[in-house]
Amino acid sequence: MKLKFIYATLALLLLFSCSVEDNLESLMQDNNEIVTYKVTQEEAQSIVQGFVDEMSFISSTRSANEMSHKEISSVYALRKNLIQTRSGADSNDFPIDLDTLMYVVNFSNDNGFVLVAADKRTEPIFAIIDEGNFNFELLSEEDNDMFLTFLDYAISTELDDIENFSGNISQTRATSNGWTINTKYAPILKTKWSQGGENNPNSYGKYCPNKTTGCTVIATAQILSHFQTISHVNWSYNGVGASSDLHWSQIISDCENNNGVLSSTYTPQSLNEVAHLCRYLGIAFGAKYNSDGSTSVGEDKPIDWFNKWGGLKASKLKEYNESQIITSIKNGNPVYGRGNSGRKKFLGITVKYKGGHAWVYDGYISATKNGKQQNLIHCNWGWGSSKFYNGYYLSKVFDTNSGPEIYDNEVTRSGQSGYYKYNLEYSIISR
């Protein structure tokens, strides 16, 4: 009997040992699987370099050549602990295996940058920016509200993708596989005009009371630079009324020769004419020029003006629709866009312009990696060139119907507490 008991005990110990070994092996496999979801800095560079290389083969256009001459100079990581420190986000907001959220891959000579996801369970690229460089450590100094809103929502989209991922490691994107550029439509606009005057007597808002045109006015003016349906404007400033002709051929030529911008030094006549146009639009829209440097316009004002006075057709503002916007861009028509703003949930940043922003969608790239298509739409934010982040942004992030909405409790200009949703809307402008 004792011998049988010993044999039984040994059998149980052997069975337990095998079970523990199997569990440990399984755990190691799971851990290895989790680790392989992470995109390293080297892999992030490879993703970007592969995209740049593919772009250099698709076309001989200037925009493609500019992309092919970009060289990677630096890579910075957006760590989870930085987000938690800035926003006070709870650790439960992030997957336990996720220590890095995103990379910024900078090109040399301020020649743009790319936002790359640090996890293989989401999209590889979130944005491709035309000019400037970026460093996540300097987030608190950034004042481009819609870029910050996009970045915040990109983080939310990434976390949502990871949470909803139900496949296995073999179904994630392999960083070594190449890109295929399906379609590319270069930006329609030749302009990179800026709304911000900040009391600058030589800005596009030089004839506005606070020297700031406002985002709605500058977005409308840039759309008009494409269609050129009006050639003469009446305006008034400081009690003096006057009129101005718009020599569009010269204005566009000056923009093409000066990286999209106009200046009092190199293109004084064109700058003056556009400043007159901006003042005219401000009056037509009933703009409120606020003492804090902001300019407010009712959200429907430009749409009504396009239809009644602009010689163009503008659809009613509707919720963001990727296919409609892409179709419009393919047809050669820029798209008027707008959205609300407020405190950034993950970035922990509040900018002074809480009421909203307007900009222009005017370009499109469709790219495929590992059999999965990405649609990136070009945004001209209306903040000029250089560090203000015009570029191609992942459309999926703009589509608030595809992911969680972010509500931010803020104080409005009227002093009342209110909620701001990302709330993206668009209007298709055509002849």
Image (cartoon, grey):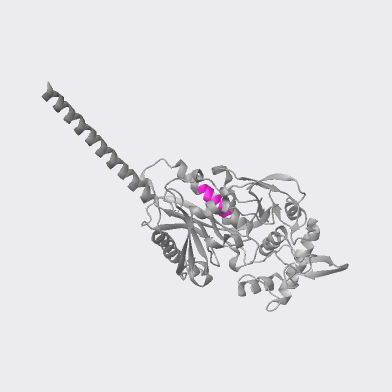
**Camera-side residue of 114 and 192:** 114
- The residue furthest bottom is 265
Residue range (magenta): 150-157
Q: Is residue 324 above or below residue 293?
A: above
Q: Residue at x 70, y 65 (%)?
A: 196
Q: Quarter holding the N terminus? A: top left
Q: Is residue 351 visible?
A: yes
Residue 355: percent from the left, percent from the top? 70, 52
Q: Is residue 339 above or below residue 235?
A: above
Q: Residue at x 44, y 61 (%)?
A: 48
In the displayed structure image, the side of residue 301 where residue 161 appears, left or right: left
Q: Is residue 185 visible?
A: no
Q: Is residue 49 above or below residue 396?
A: below
In the displayed structure image, the side of residue 154 where residue 211 appears, left or right: right
Q: Residue at x 49, y 49 (%)?
A: 158
Q: Quarter holding the C terminus? A: bottom right
Residue 305: percent from the left, percent from the top? 76, 55
Residue 342: percent from the left, percent from the top? 65, 51
**Camera-side residue of 89 and 270:** 89
Residue 422: percent from the left, percent from the top? 63, 48
User: In the rendered structure, does residue 151 fall within the stretch colored magenta?
Assistant: yes
Is most of the magenta stretch helix, strand or loop? helix
User: In the rendered structure, does residue 224 fall within the stretch colored magenta?
Assistant: no
